Image (tube, rainbow, N blue to C red):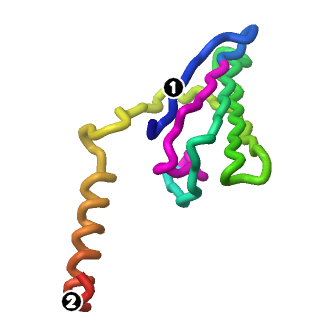
Amino acid sequence: MWNGDSRGGWEGNTLVVDITNYNDKGNVATNAATQRVRSIPQSEDLHVVERFTRVDENTINYEVVVEDPKVFTAPWKVAMSLNREPKYELFEYACHEGNHAVPNTLSAGRAKDKAAARAGTQ
């Protein structure tokens, strides 16, 4: 599966999401805040465990442990606080009104195709 198979459950006040069954065709994102994927490969052995712990009404502690013995020499972990932003809007993962990513991606692809055609490498 491209995004793995998620199973969640509670450990006290912490939601634990265990993700397995990835395929080896994807990659691991290294900067979730900017959605930039740096093409770190993944194997079918990728195993991710996410933990969401509500600290107070405005804060969730987020922790993720990533392990893939075919790619990494050891598991790695990221931990951060997620703070409530009252005016924050979360958009759908796919397309939505005002999404500039798709048109920008398409126009960049067209520009790359034109440059390749001019260079005779298309």
Amino acid marked by disc 2: Arg
Residue under the image location 70 percent in, 42 percent down: 67
Amino acid marked by disc 1: Pro
The image quarter in which residue 7 lies? top right
Residue under the image location 67 percent in, 10 percent down: 10
Q: Disc 2 and disc 1: Cα gap in Å? A: 49 Å
- Numbered disc 2: secondary structure: helix
On the image, numbered disc 1 is attached to which residue?
86
Residue 74 is covered by the magenta coloring: no
**Badge 2 local density, few (<14 within 10 Å), some, or many (20+)?**
few
The image quarter in which residue 83 lies? top right
Q: Answer above or below: position of 1 versus 15.
A: below
Select label 2 or label 1 by which is in front: 2
On residue 118, the disc is 2
For the stretch drawn in magenta, the main secondary structure is loop
Percent x, y for residue 11? 73, 11
- Numbered disc 1: secondary structure: loop
Residue found at the very far bottom of the displayed protein: 119
Percent x, y for residue 62? 68, 30
Query: Left or right of 70: which side holds 122?
Result: left
Percent x, y for residue 54? 69, 17
Q: Are marks 2 and 1 in contact (CB under 8 Å)?
A: no
What stretch of residues is rendered in magenta? 16-33
**Badge 1 local density, few (<14 within 10 Å), some, or many (20+)?**
few
Residue under the image location 57 percent in, 50 percent down: 42
